[in-house]
């Protein structure tokens, strides 16, 4: 079976970087575009990182890298030093030798949705700014894509940047709400599931033992582990962004439920909260009409880990796809 067309929209980001490597390692996808969005790093830095990663993994001659929107839909300011000064720890990757694309990330999404109508999968591992921008330009995108899988949100667990909000949604809540209310077929892979699949020092030892082709990846994951140890006291780190890529191909990595996601955009205290209204329970509550109207747009939401072991699969897949 031929690999399926996919766009990866990313804000690299340490776990975004290995999510790209994992996607390439699966052999399941025909990566049509790699689009950059601001989040873990400002958009210009994210774009530079994406171009460097495309070169490092040997795809810069085949996969165009597109710069994302210059500001968020919400016009909020967000910043994260969690991924280090460059977004990739302290790594400064050589720039791609390919010419810079003039086409924006949103324009590329729209073009590819026409070219591969009904077939295109989009995986977003950063804020949903670019996807929302494309939907605002052409709402028909929602019916042309086969599926959107995005890493973001927290349905039944606390957030990771506020008590209520996960970072990607908090960074551009209006963008996230535009996306989940658009009618696009989506799966939200948030903290409920991503905190369950971990990368450990034993996994890092496997990368170290693999030799030169995994040295860059081992540096990324060593830095990522150190950030979790420093900030959270954890001896392992969650596989946030790679899991979203995994779920795009295999939902058995997570358990899911169908329902409606509503994003809190008006409250500064609750900014970015993702409220999950389970389909089988939504009608029990006295929601105002404008909220009840939202329940006609449903998606899939990951509520926990699934029966298939993603952590092992992730490391084994990386080992099949070394960098250059």
Image (spheres, helix red, strand yellow):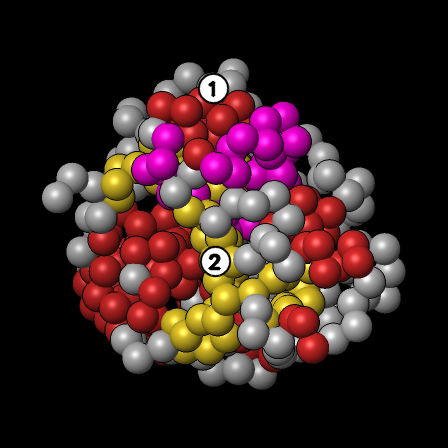
Q: Is residue 52 above or below residue 62?
A: below
Is residue 87 something one can see in this rendering? no
Q: Does residue 313 appear anywhere in the picture? A: yes
Query: Residue 221: which quarter of the image?
Result: bottom left
- In the rendered image, residue 282 lying in the magenta stretch gets the answer no
Q: Position of residue 50 (x, y in %)?
A: 46, 38
Q: Quadrant of the N terminus?
A: top left
Viewer-proximal residue, 181 or 83?
181
Instruction: Say the numbered circle drawn on residue 101.
Output: 1
Left or right placement of residue 253 versus residue 259 in this view? left
How far apart marks 2 and 1 lie (CA) works out to: 29 Å
Q: Residues within 10 Å of mark 2 (few under 14, many from 20)?
A: many
Tell me which residue sits at (20%, 41%) in the image. Answer: 3
Residue 77 image position (x, y, % from top left): 79, 47
Question: Callout 2: helix, strand or loop?
Answer: strand
Query: What residue is at 79 percent from the left and 72 percent from the top?
Result: 286
Mark 1 closeness class: few <14, some 14–19, many ≥20 residues within 10 Å: few
- Residue that numbered label 2 is attached to: 187
In the figure, residue 104 lies in which quadrant?
Answer: top right
Secondary structure at badge 1 equals loop
The residue shown at (49%, 26%) is 110
Q: Nearer the viewer, mark 2 or mark 1?
A: 2
Query: Any magenta on residue 124?
Result: yes
Magenta highlight range: 117-143
């Amino acid at each position: 079976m031929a690999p399926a067309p996919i766009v990866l929209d990313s804000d690299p980001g340490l776990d975004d970087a290995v999510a790209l490597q994992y996607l390439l390692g699966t052999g399941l996808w025909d990566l049509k575009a790699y689009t950059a969005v601001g989040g873990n790093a400002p958009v210009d830095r994210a774009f530079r990182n994406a171009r460097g990663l495309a070169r490092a993994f040997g795809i810069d001659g085949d996969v165009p890298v597109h710069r994302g929107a210059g500001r968020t839909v919400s016009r909020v300011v967000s910043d994260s030093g969690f991924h280090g000064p460059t977004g990739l720890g302290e790594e400064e990757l050589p720039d791609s030798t390919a010419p810079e694309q003039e086409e924006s990330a949103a324009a590329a999404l729209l073009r590819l949705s026409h070219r591969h109508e009904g077939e295109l999968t989009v995986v977003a591992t950063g804020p949903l700014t670019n996807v929302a921008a494309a939907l605002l330009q052409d709402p028909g995108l929602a019916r042309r894509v086969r599926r959107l899988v995005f890493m973001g949100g927290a349905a039944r667990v606390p957030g990771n940047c506020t008590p209520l909000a996960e970072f990607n949604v908090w960074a551009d809540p209006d963008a996230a709400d535009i996306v989940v209310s658009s009618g696009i077929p989506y799966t939200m892979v948030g903290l409920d599931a991503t905190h369950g699949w971990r990368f450990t020092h034993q996994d890092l030892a496997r990368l170290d033992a693999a030799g030169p082709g995994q040295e860059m990846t081992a540096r990324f994951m060593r830095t990522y582990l150190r950030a979790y140890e420093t900030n959270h006291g954890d001896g392992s780190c969650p596989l946030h962004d790679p899991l979203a890529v995994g779920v795009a191909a295999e939902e058995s990595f997570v358990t899911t439920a169908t329902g409606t996601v509503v994003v809190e955009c008006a409250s500064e205290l609750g900014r970015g909260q993702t409220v999950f209204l389970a389909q089988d329970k939504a009608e029990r509550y006295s929601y105002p009409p404008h909220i009840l109207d939202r329940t006609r747009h449903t998606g899939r939401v990951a509520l926990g880990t699934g029966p298939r072991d993603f952590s092992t699969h992730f490391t084994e897949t990386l080992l099949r796809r070394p960098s250059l």
